[in-house]
Image (cartoon, coloured by chain):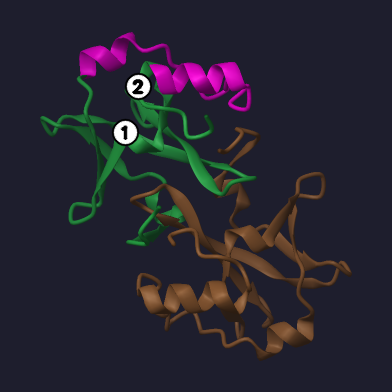
Chain colours: A brown, B green
Amino acid sequence: MHRFRRTLGASTLVHDKVVNLSGEDIGRIEELMIDVTTGRVAYAVLSFGGFMGIGNKLFVLPWSVLTVDEARKRFVVNVTRDALDKVPGFDKDHWPDLNDLEYATGVYHQWEVMPYWT
Amino acid sequence: MHRFRRTLGASTLVHDKVVNLSGEDIGRIEELMIDVTTGRVAYAVLSFGGFMGIGNKLFVLPWSVLTVDEARKRFVVNVTRDALDKVPGFDKDHWPDLNDLEYATGVYHQWEVMPYWT
């Protein structure tokens, strides 16, 4: 059962800032990956670190770990910068195969949320 | 139960062409509206008619009426151009309140699909 609540345009969410619970900057939304069959946001892709897009690392996050702070047009994730430093990311020219079920499941487990496809 | 299948970037889907079952051009994806709480694509916004973005009409479609034709990088919808002409659209400077539950339900009924939030 899902109550219909609030919609925002995917294009307006991409590039939004992401902070943690202490308000520290942990990056920006690089892309939203849509699970085409079910019409769900499978992942948000977060870009972290670097400067002007150079030297940054990308991560995939389950949508459910993100909270929208609509007033400040940003997302909030419960993660420290240190913890994020230790998460294996990837660089923008070498994306992992996000459609691999094992990879997908690994990401959800890493963030301790139940995959929506089980 | 949802099997995980295939993900595509929201940014790459926006502006994709939309055709009907006869292959007739019926517009382009203008935006994907994300239901923030549940992480679902509530609607695709379709832009239809006009020329170079002038004089076009916008429509909201439930995600589930769209099929992705990945090989040809386009969407397919089972609707005639005549039928689409009769659907009440809106112009780009006057969007309806997509978060109004009655409006949302009306759109899903119009396209004869069950709202995912019931």
Count residues near mark 1 (Cα–Cα under 10 Å), then give few for <14, some for 14-19, many for 20+: some
Instruction: Name above or below for residue A28 compared with residue B75.
Output: below
The amino acid on which the numbered mark 2 sits, given as a three-letter code, is Trp
Q: Residue furthest top?
A: B86
Residue drawn at point x = 25 percent, y = 13 percent: B83
Which residue in the protein does label 2 denote? B111
Residue drawn at point x = 53 percent, y = 23 percent: B104
User: Tag 1, which secondary structure?
Assistant: helix
Q: Position of residue A106 (x, y in %)?
A: 49, 79
Depth order, front residue of A59/B46: A59
Which range is magenta? B81-109
Q: Chain of mark 2?
A: B
Q: Residue furthest right?
A: A22
Residue drawn at point x = 46 percent, y = 29 percent: B115
Closer to the chain start, of discs 2 and 1, is: 1
State the separation of the CA atoms marked 2 and 1.
7 Å
Residue A69 visible (yes or no)? yes
Count residues near mark 2 (Cα–Cα under 10 Å), then give few for <14, some for 14-19, many for 20+: some
Which residue in the protein does label 1 denote? B65
Q: Position of residue B51 (x, y in %)?
A: 33, 26
The amino acid on which the numbered mark 1 sits, given as a three-letter code, is Val
Is there a contact, CB below 8 Å, between mark 2 and mark 1?
yes
Residue B91 visible (yes or no)? no
Q: Position of residue A31 (x, y in %)?
A: 52, 62
Residue B86 highlighted magenta (yes or no): yes
Instruction: Name above or below for residue A118 compared with residue A92.
Output: above
Depth order, front residue of B23/A85: A85
